[in-house]
Image (tube, helix red, strand yellow):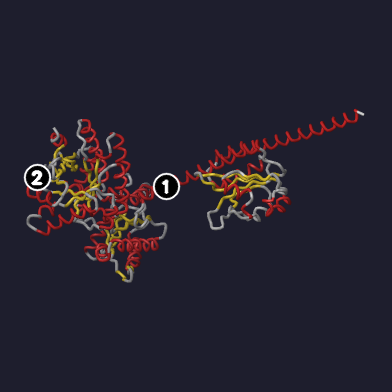
Amino acid sequence: MTEPHSESNEEHAGTSLKTEVAGLVGQNLRITRALKTLSAGNRTLLRATDEQVLLAEMCRVAVVHGGYRLAMVNYAMQDDAKSVRTVAHHGSNNGFIEALNLTWSDTERGQGTVGIAIRSGKHCIFRSTSDDPRFRPWRDRAIEHGFLSLISLPLRVDDLVIGTFTLLAGEEDAFDRAEFDLLDEVAADLSFGISVIRTRIKKAESEQLARRALTRDAVTGLLNRSAFLLELSAIIEANVHRPEPITVLVVRLTRLQEIYDGFGYDPGLEVLRELARRLEAVLGSNVTLGRLQSDEFGVFLPAHDARAASIVAAKLQTTLAEPVSVGEIAIDVAATIGSSFYPGHGDEAEMLLRRAAIAAREGARKDAPYYTYTGTSQRENPERLALAAELRRAIDQQELILHYQPKVDLKTGRIVGAESLVRWMHPKRGLIPPLQFIPLAEETGLIRQMTYGIIESAIRQQHAWVRRGVELPVAVNLSVRNLYDPRLVDAYTEQISTWGIEPRLIDFEITESALVDDPERAKQVLSFMRNRGASIYIDDFGTGYSSLNYLVSLPVHFLKIDRAFVTQMKARKEARAVVASVISMAHNLGLLVVAEGVETQEEADTLNALGCDQGQGYFFHKPLPASEYEKLFH
């Protein structure tokens, strides 16, 4: 009686053991495929540089190496329907993916693993596609394709769920705890890989925008002067061994200031943009076009001789002759085109551009629409060129020195800082006035290196003064060309780092007229300096064409009243009224005011009575060498 019962128990035990062994085998297989997916996925992540390639490769890895029937990456769309887009997949599906019509909204088609995982931010598993009622919209097609269980794991980038990594298996009851833990790592790694690629792309885009800001004109989007010169220099260098003619054209807009005066600054900028579009259309994409300064465009034409240049110039004149609409008014924009040629007029980019600009100005003076450089300009006389060569040598050998003119608080008489003023003691000519060599530096392109040297000297001197207990700011003057210089910010930052002084000890002064040329470019450069701690001065205020509209938006601390108004205050009530108005306006804008050229006690008292904050001039102190300036504090 007991034997059959014993045999039955043995059979039952054997069946249970087989079931248990089969379960263990299935579990091991699932763990193995998840491990293979994780391992192959890690190798993929190391090589990935493109997001779409990464997604496709991770899906392929899951199917080919892991053995899953189908792998998908689905992204949540931020549209009204909260739709889901399958951005990558691998595995045979025969139209299954196209028929999914997924959403992550809380509707019937949002109750699948994808919609639930996106909404909840947690993984979702359907262990049986045939039994789970939430899978009803897709059940028949899934069973037909052998997709019997599935899992969706959320993908996170910057703490936001952007979609899911979804795997479909060919057996029911897949994705137990051990398999899930491994796949959760796969999804985390994939999220990390997406984040890294997107961060890299954002960084590259930011760098590209930064490079564009340094090389492009903010108004027209054309190359700025520095970038134009770099490209022209590259073409010239490429022509050294087999010289081919190169034409440089400068298009000078002779009535642009009239447009600013008559219609305002913004309409004037719109005229510039329209003219830039016309020039681009005529020249085509293979010709280099740039905006050199407020009223000049530059063009260079490789392999163009004088005859070919005149043909191009005629086409440009034709398109510029068409009126430009400002509102309902059609405006005629006059232009003169000047030309110079490589190698006949020079073998340096700066020289060729300068000579084409001289030709444009000479053409405007003679009312000629097109004029070629002739070399007869006073700007090109031998004495002046010799002085330019000597100035280059003086800059290279650091012969230029700085004198410092104190700025004084008008209420207390206390020195609050100084302006650095460059001096050139020529070994043979003696002291050369700044008004003679600074414009020369501007016209010959030497102003860039000169400014670098001035910044370095001022920072080096500040380092010495700080060590002696003197910590007052020193201002450095910037020109229009400095604002176009893409190396200026780096040169300043490098010197600040080298000498270890606080940026607040170096201020910057820029003339009002320089701001008119390109206020957006000025704003970029000056904002950087201000953010580092520098104070910004607008020099010679009242002598240019300032627009209060952009003055309000510029990162400025001080206005400097030009000495012409200060010296006329006693004789002319109008000058005094202008000074009073500037002081009142500046204070209303939250700015401080410095008066230049103060030469008498009466002028100082008058300025103080009007509320002017600081004064600068011979009444207080003339510009002093560093050693003399330092004595004022001992």
Q: Which residue is mark 2?
A: 619
Mark in front: 1 vs 2: 2
At horizontal 25% and vertical 58% (from top left) the residue drawn is 547
Q: Quadrant of the C terminus?
A: top left
Horizontally, is 218 left or right of 442 in the view? right
Q: Is residue 324 above or below residue 169?
A: below
Q: Position of residue 518 (x, y in %)?
A: 30, 54
Residue 541, percent from left and from top: 19, 53
Identify the residue shown where x is 71% and y is 42%: 173
Between residues 85 and 395, which one lies in front from this camera angle?
85
The residue that mark 1 highlights is: 206
The disc labelled 2 sits on which kind of residue? Phe
Q: Quadrant of residue 270?
A: bottom left
Q: Residue furthest front?
A: 1
Observer-nearest residue: 446 or 407? 407
In screen coordinates, is 12 left or right of 383?
A: right
Amino acid identity at mark 1: Ser
Q: Helix or strand or loop: what does disc 1 sit on? A: helix
Q: Residue at x 15, y 43 (%)?
A: 408
- The reply, left or right, for residue 338 in relation to residue 414 is right
Q: Can see residue 429? A: no
Question: Would residue 126 appear left or right of 566 to someone viewing this image?
Answer: right
Q: Earlier in the sequence, mark 1 or mark 2?
A: 1
Residue 495: mark? none
- Quadrant including the N terminus: top right
Mark 2: few/some/many CA within 10 Å (<14, 14-19, 20+): some
Residue 570, image quadrant: bottom left
Image position, residue 51 (x, y; %): 54, 46
Report the number of numbered marks.
Answer: 2
